[in-house]
Amino acid sequence: METIKIMGTDDTPTVILDAENDIFEISGRSLPEDVTAFYDPILNWLDEYATSPNPKTIFTFKLVYFNTASSKLLLDILMKFEEMHENGQDVLIKWYYPEDDEDMQEAGEEYADIVDVPFEQVSYTLN
Amino acid sequence: MDKKNVKGFLEFVYDFYKSMKAHEITLVYEGEITHQITKAFTSLTESNMAKEEESNTVQKKVFHVMVECLQNISKHADSFGSDDFLFAGRGIFMVSKADVEYHVTTGNVIENSKIDELTKILDHINTLDKEGLKDLYKTQMREGRLSEKGGAGLGFIDIARKTGRKLNYHFLPIDEETHFFILTSTISRNE
């Protein structure tokens, strides 16, 4: 499959979807001008990936900020993994949050409540 | 401008300056809210807060509230006294900083026909506690759809959650068809 590599900016996250090297990650800030245009290629990529995924898929979220419009699209990504999980595929979501960021931690908890998918919360220290 | 007008204008500038100082306004803007404007204002406010060594929590809350407020105007503000589409998406945006709190205030024109629904949404949010807001956010995220303009119907809920306060809003009559909608969000600096 083709690899997606989007370098982050001050309003869009870094996205790496690399099936060959087992890297699936979205990190940084997300408040794109047009959320649908930004996330559509990612959702389409995941649809295609789901048809023949790797034996195990670990998807990393390491966001420091996202706006409410992005929150809806992040849920759409998670729902793709929920579907894969329902189909018996081995997937794990790793939700990273800065250790002093309760809101980001809580956002992870909320997603874990909504979607039925293996979900791990990981705190980290900024620099 | 003749001499008299120049004097009047200078006095206006000085009064405006004084009144900004009196209300502790650090940023004020009237016009179209674009994505570029949103980015510029948030980064300006961020660097000011960093300079003043505001806590991370407060910085993040102010950032969240600013983005959602600005996006509300750009997506929902109606046109003023004209059907010209070019005048939609505009409004006034202000940030003020007092000793104990930040205020983010937006004002924009809204058609009378939309007031009932907006009031219902805001009042409903204001009846909810922390858990209630969390549940509403989750439901809206799951069941809501992105509008054509990219709105997810989550902005007001997020503002209420991030500030931990009731949404403080007013409608002032403009003419027979429109009102001016003012929303003030307050973020406490002692967190």
Image (cartoon, rainbow, N blue to C red):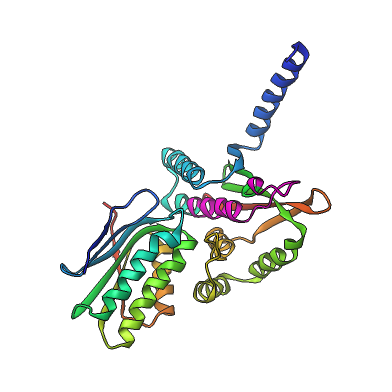
Residue B110: x percent and y percent? 71, 54
| Numbered circles on residues, count | 0
Question: Is residue B45 found inside the magenta-colored segment of the image?
Answer: no
Give the main secondary structure, helix, strand or loop, of the magenta stretch. Answer: helix
Q: Residue furthest left?
A: A21
Q: Is residue B48 above or below residue B102?
A: above
Residue A110, quarter of picture: bottom left
The residue located at (63%, 32%) in the rendering is B21
Q: In this view, does B15 lie to the left or right of B174?
A: left
Q: In this view, does A20 lie to the left or right of B19?
A: left
Residue B87: x percent and y percent? 66, 45
Residue B23, quarter of picture: top right
Q: Which residue lies furthest to the top in this view?
A: B3
Residue B115, quarter of picture: bottom right
Q: Is residue A12 above or below residue B160?
A: above
The residue located at (41%, 72%) in the rendering is A76
Q: In this view, does B97 lie to the left or right of A3?
A: right
Q: Can residue A34 be seen in this view?
A: yes
Residue B176: x percent and y percent? 84, 53
Q: In this view, does A32 lie to the left or right of A85?
A: right
Question: Is residue B81 found inside the magenta-colored segment of the image?
Answer: yes
Identify the image quadrant of the N terminus of chain B. top right
Q: Can residue A98 be seen in this view?
A: no
Q: Is residue B51 above or below residue B127?
A: above
Q: Which residue lies furthest to the right in this view?
A: B176
Residue B79: x percent and y percent? 69, 49
The residue located at (54%, 73%) in the rendering is B144
What is the span of residues highlighted in magenta in the rendered image?
Answer: B62-87
